Amino acid sequence: MNTTQPSRITVVGAGFGALSAVRELRQRDPHALITLVAPRAELHYLPGIIWIPSGLRTRQDLVVPLHNFFRRMRVTHLAAEATGLSADGRTLHTTAGQVLNDGLVIASGGRFIKKLPGIAHSITPCEGIAAAEAIRDRVKAMPGGTIAMGFAGNPNEPTAVRGGPVFEFLFGMDEQLRREGRRDQFKLVFFNPSKEPGNRLGAKAVGHLLAEMKRRNITTHLGHKLKAFEADKVVTEGGEFAADLIVFMPGMTGNTWFDQTSLPRSPGGLIQADATCRVPGFERVVVVGDSGSFPGPDWMPKQAHMADLQAAAAADNLVADLIGKPSHTTFKVELICIIDAIDHGTLVYRTPKRNLILPSTRLFHWAKRGFEWMYLRQYR
């Protein structure tokens, strides 16, 4: 496509990948007509929900209105949800009607797999701020008991797992209860179907995490496939154990609206993408973040930093496609995370060539808070 008229670009979503795509697109094309489709003009900063149970963060701290950002970026916000796609990607169907485009960015995230029997008895923390508030309120009301925390993956999509936040909730809860003088009234249990939880962070990280659990007197139940949750227990193929509160992060799959499209899907239900973030068989359609299945190592993370890297590559290639220029920009595969425990943090860094873990210090905790301030500043 090569036209003198401004390109119409539609972005689906209002999370990290979508907003980074908006910034990258606007940088490359000052004249594009950008429409963003999302139910609310808000960014919910989910990395900060780990601090809600301890009171270090509140809902007000983590919900950022996007009206000013949209005005600066000259973005039209359509308050709606995507429901389908037609005309080879040129028409997005939404709850507010059809949106025509010359280029499409899909960054609507993923959804958690809720097939485990009794999963309603658990809280899925990364579903949003309300989930973290529910954990806070439940623990505050508990005189004592067993708190079980764990995660699992999508067996058909090795990268569609989000385990890091569970470690942060786990270590943060231990620290919180100690500060409250109530730790001896609680038993903390970490469970995972793998014998090496966190192995996507690297072999060194697994050893560090397990050693940290032992140091904090956190019981582990590892290497057994989950069978079910009940109101007061976790049931696995290797036995069951009591739990008064279950915090569980299931594996991820694609949004339900993907089912109303002919977009190519991965075995795990995500949108298939190539190394340039383009969707095979669809002209000028790119995917970013949790919505996509990308070529790369099986430890490639589903996290905000990775979505930002993909957004830059996607914007580069989409803008080039719109003006008829060749472009084959790929994204860097990089895992960077700070596993926080309220006042200390451990840094984990991984690329295809390097894997580094730096022990827990106050410096990394403050670095995580500093990054949050800098990241949100660009949207406030």
Image (tube, helix red, strand yellow):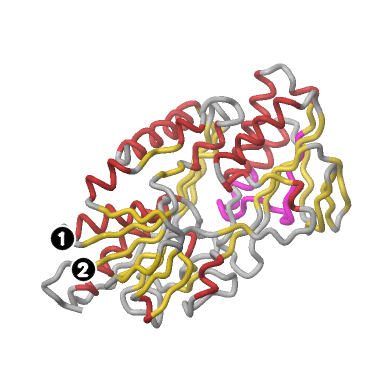
Q: Nearer the viewer, residue 325 or 72?
A: 72
Amino acid beneath label 1: His
**In the image, 221: left or right of 380?**
right
Quarter residue 283 falls in = bottom left
What residue do we see at 27% from left, 72% from top? 102
58 vs 266: above or below: above
**In the image, 361: left or right of 101?**
right
Q: Tag 1, which secondary structure?
A: loop
Amino acid beneath label 2: Ser
Discs 1, 2 touching: Cβ within 8 Å: yes
Residue at which label 1 appears: 31
> In x, y percent, where is residue 258?
51, 70
Q: Quadrant of the N terminus?
A: bottom left
> In x, y percent, where is residue 115?
72, 61
Tell me if mark 1 has few (under 14), some (14-19) or many (20+) residues whose alpha carbon lies within 10 angstroms of its own: some
Residue at which label 2 appears: 7
135 vs 326: above or below: above
What residue do we see at 24% from left, 73% from top? 327
What residue do we see at 38% from left, 58% from top? 37
> In x, y percent, where is residue 323?
18, 74
> In x, y percent, where is residue 185?
80, 23
Q: What number is the disc on residue 130?
A: none
245 vs 263: above or below: above
Examine the structure image and report whether residue 301 is included in the region drawn in magenta. Answer: no
